[in-house]
Amino acid sequence: MTGTDYLVEGEAVLPKLSREDFQKIFGLSSEHPVLGAFKITPSNNKIFTHFINFDFDQFDYWLFCGD
């Protein structure tokens, strides 16, 4: 695989979280529309741990937001 190829092993649907929640989690400004892909790391995964069991040694995790 190259740096732009990714294999999706699975996905999870999260409960409705506010734009402000995501802005706070990812350190975004209040004007940021929270559209795009955001990497979930050990330092910002706390709000997601109720829904996903993370294994950061084996996998990378991303949050995709948008239409």
Image: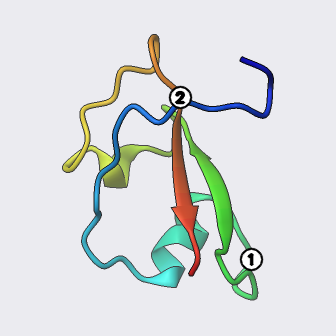
For disc 1, the neighbor class at 10 Å (few under 14, some 14 to 19, many from 20) is: few
Q: How many marks?
A: 2
Which amino acid does the dot numbered 1 rest on? Ser
Q: Label 1: which residue? A: 29
User: Mark 2 — residue?
Assistant: 60
Kindly state the secondary structure of the residue where label 1 is placed: loop
The correct choice, above or below, for 56 with respect to 46 in the image is above
Seen from the viewer's position, the closer of residues 19 and 8 is 8
The quadrant the N terminus occupies is top right
Position of the C terminus by quadrant: bottom right
Tell me what residue is drawn at x 78 percent, y 34 percent.
4
On screen, residue 21 versus residue 26, left or right, reads left
The residue at the far left in this view is 50
Q: Amino acid at mark 2?
A: Asp
Q: Say whether disc 1 or disc 2 marks the residue closer to the N-terminus.
A: 1
How packed mark 2 is, by other alpha carbons closer than 10 Å (few <14, some 14-19, many 20 or more), is few
Relative to 39, residue 57 above or below = above
Asked which quadrant contains residue 3, the reply is top right
Residue 57 position, x and y percent, is: 46, 11
* Nearer to us in this view, 32 or 37: 37
Q: Secondary structure at mark 2?
A: loop
